[in-house]
Each structure stands twice: as structure tokens, then as C-alpha cells.
Image (cartoon, rainbow, N blue to C red):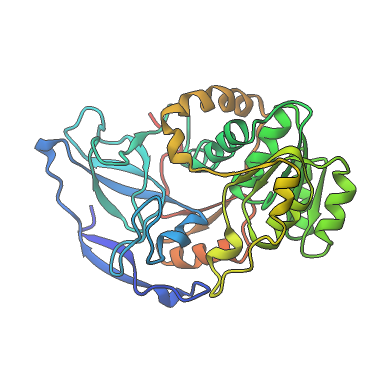
């Protein structure tokens, strides 16, 4: 085992768009686990990148404490247990959690967000993408917050991203009519291949006009990952008793000055519509319920997923920047080093 623990830490609070100088590389000794207490040593193998990481870097309270300047950047990952006497986390097992931008970390089963074993036959890519937080977010956002049902008209923004692409497919598989919104012809083509009836290229098409043409009777469920002008367009086409599901606000995460909010909130009153935000963390106790439906869809090939895999520890900050430049197609991942493809 290398005695060096490579880390990327937060060097300063980002001001506007993220840049690589917001992060600093350092090397520290590998931490020593207290094996007798059940603590284990993990070696990170794969990292996941999510828009919410940008929120964690701000000096403001959210659903998790902000990452402090000088701390390892928080991130989802899959790791291997390399030292353990804990029978619940045996050596060689693959686990998933929020282990951050580093090679090694310590963990316990009683941590606030404890490591979870990958199920047999599930590889790291699948764990972080198809069965990770993005899939669970799409599932519970649509089913519980959106009231998803057959025959509903569903519009999903950022439909070419990790969460959006899952939302498109879950809505379709539940019998809804789905329209996606994405940036660029390549992403829109992929969204349509996932089963969306159509996909609006917001970079090259007039979003309100296209929504009016594709959703003449209104939008029953608007699943929004973007905010700003796109959210305003969704509210403008919401159907009577429709629901706007607030999943994310990527339009404002990386902006020096947040874009103006929707100017047409009165339409929610006129339409007696509901707008509601949610956090996937509130549904962690029901993951088995989601997997019971998602698992068979994956096994049968009805639910597909795509990941954009980068390589190498030195590319970690660049990979997060890719996410905010819209360069990823599907889930943004990085492989630190080759890992076993399935959990034993």
C-alpha cells in the first residue's frame, strides 16, 4: 500500500464560475484505522460528479454543511475496503458513500452517512449511475412529489444529464408522455433514443414556443433541474392542478450573479398548480422500494444509462468543470485506477 494519500482540497471559495485554481493538490500520510472499534480503511476507486457539489462549496448552510476551505472536497465514490476487522465491512468489499477527492479515508458503520456495500453483480459504474443517487432522485421526485401516472404529460429539463435521463425513462416506463429539454443536437438525439416523444434544444430553439406546440393541453408534471428561464417557461405551460418538481437549479450554481427567478408565479395560482422542492436524502429509508422497480427494468434492458468516464487522479478538478460546461453525456464519473468490476 502506498504511504501517500493524494487529496484535492478546497483552496478558496469560488467566485462565480469554477476554475481549477479553486482547488489545491496535496499529499498526506495514509490514515491509520482504529480496527478494534470497527473503523475501516477505504481506498477510493471511482468518483461521481454532481451539480450539487457546487452548492457544497458555498459558504452557506444547506442540507449538508459546506466544505470548509482547506478540507477535502466532498464527493460520492466507490471504494474498496483495504483494512478491516469489521464483519459488516470485510476486506476486499466494494462500498459506496461520500468519501471525497482522496485516495484513502476512514469510515464506520455508524457514520452519519455510512458506507453501503455494493450488491452482488453491481459494478462501480452502475452503482454511481444507474442505481446511484441520481436514479433515486429521479424516481422519488417523479413518483412521490410529481404524482407520476399513466397518461400524464411530463417535461424534464437537463434531460441529457444523469438525473434527467433517468427521469425521462422512469416517466416513460410508468406510462407517461415525455418531452425532454437539453442543450445541443447530440444530447437531444440521445434523449429521444431513451423514449422521449421529442426533445427541445434550448440553445437553438425557442423554448416557450416549442413547449406550446408540444404540450397544447399543458404540462402535468414539470421535472426541473435547471431553474431560471427554463423554469419560467415550464410554469408558463403548467396544466391545471399540475405539479412543478424542483430537483435542481444548475443555472444558478456556477454563476457569479444568479439569473432572475421566474416572473410568472401568478400562473401557479391561476392553474391551482403545486411547486415543491425535495431532497433524495429524505427517501433513503425507501431505497428498497425504488430498487424493486428499477432493478427489473435494468435487468430487462428497458432502463438504460450512460456514463462519461474520465481517467486519473490529476484530472479530478477538470472533470467537475466538465459538468458545468455541459460536456458530459449521462453521469459524469472518474476512475482513479482499475477496480474489480463486481462485488464478490
Residue at 70% in and 34% down: 171
Image position, residue 322 (x, y; %): 56, 64
Residue 217 relative to residue 111: left or right: right
Residue 277 relative to residue 232: left or right: left
Q: Which image quarter: residue 258? A: bottom right
Specify the quadrant that holds the C terminus: top left
Can residue 271 be seen in the rendering of this structure?
A: yes
Residue 70 relative to residue 122: left or right: left
Relative depth, front residue between 37 and 219: 219
Report how many numbered discs are placed on residues in the image. Answer: 0
Relative depth, front residue between 95 and 149: 149
Relative depth, front residue between 40 and 51: 51
Can residue 130 be seen in the rendering of this structure?
A: no
Where 243 falls versus 3 (above or below)?
above
Image position, residue 181 (x, y; %): 74, 52
Image position, residue 215 (x, y; %): 85, 44
Residue at 56% in and 74% down: 257
Residue at 48% in and 75% down: 19
Residue 6 relative to residue 51: left or right: left
Image position, residue 317 (x, y; %): 45, 67
Residue at 53% in and 36% down: 136
Q: Which image quarter: residue 86? A: top left
Where 292 falls versus 140 (above or below)?
above
Amino acid at each position: 500500500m502506498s504511504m501517500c494519500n493524494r487529496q484535492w482540497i478546497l483552496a478558496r471559495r469560488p467566485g462565480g464560475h469554477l476554475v481549477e485554481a479553486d482547488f489545491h493538490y496535496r499529499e498526506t500520510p495514509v490514515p491509520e484505522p482504529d480496527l478494534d472499534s470497527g473503523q475501516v480503511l477505504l481506498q477510493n476507486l471511482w468518483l461521481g460528479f454532481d451539480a450539487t457539489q457546487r452548492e457544497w462549496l458555498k459558504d452557506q448552510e444547506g442540507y449538508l454543511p459546506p466544505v470548509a476551505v482547506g478540507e477535502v472536497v466532498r464527493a460520492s465514490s466507490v471504494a474498496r475496503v483495504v483494512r478491516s476487522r469489521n464483519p459488516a465491512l470485510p476486506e476486499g468489499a466494494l462500498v459506496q458513500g461520500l468519501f471525497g477527492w482522496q485516495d484513502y479515508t476512514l469510515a464506520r458503520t455508524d457514520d452519519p452517512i455510512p458506507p453501503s456495500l455494493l450488491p452482488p453483480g453491481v459494478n462501480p459504474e452502475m452503482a454511481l449511475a444507474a442505481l446511484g443517487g441520481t436514479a433515486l432522485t429521479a424516481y422519488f421526485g417523479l413518483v412521490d412529489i410529481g404524482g407520476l401516472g399513466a397518461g400524464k404529460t411530463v417535461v424534464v429539463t437537463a434531460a441529457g444529464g444523469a438525473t434527467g435521463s433517468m427521469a425521462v425513462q422512469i416517466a416513460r416506463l410508468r406510462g407517461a408522455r415525455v418531452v425532454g429539454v437539453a442543450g445541443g443536437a447530440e444530447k437531444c438525439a440521445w434523449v429521444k433514443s431513451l423514449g422521449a416523444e421529442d426533445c427541445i434544444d434550448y440553445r437553438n430553439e425557442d423554448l416557450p414556443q416549442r413547449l406550446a406546440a408540444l404540450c397544447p393541453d399543458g404540462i402535468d408534471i414539470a421535472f426541473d433541474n435547471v431553474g431560471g428561464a427554463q423554469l419560467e417557461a415550464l410554469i408558463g405551460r403548467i396544466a391545471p392542478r399540475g405539479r412543478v418538481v424542483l430537483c435542481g437549479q444548475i443555472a444558478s450554481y456556477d454563476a457569479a450573479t444568479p439569473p432572475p427567478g421566474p416572473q410568472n408565479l401568478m400562473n401557479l395560482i391561476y392553474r391551482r398548480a403545486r411547486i415543491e422542492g425535495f431532497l433524495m436524502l429524505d427517501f433513503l429509508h425507501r431505497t428498497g422500494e425504488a430498487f424493486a422497480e428499477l432493478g427489473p427494468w435494468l435487468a430487462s434492458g428497458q432502463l438504460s444509462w450512460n456514463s462519461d468516464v474520465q481517467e486519473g487522479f490529476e484530472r479530478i478538478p477538470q472533470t467537475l468543470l466538465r459538468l458545468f460546461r455541459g460536456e458530459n453525456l449521462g453521469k459524469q464519473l472518474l476512475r482513479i485506477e482499475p477496480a474489480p468490476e463486481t462485488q464478490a
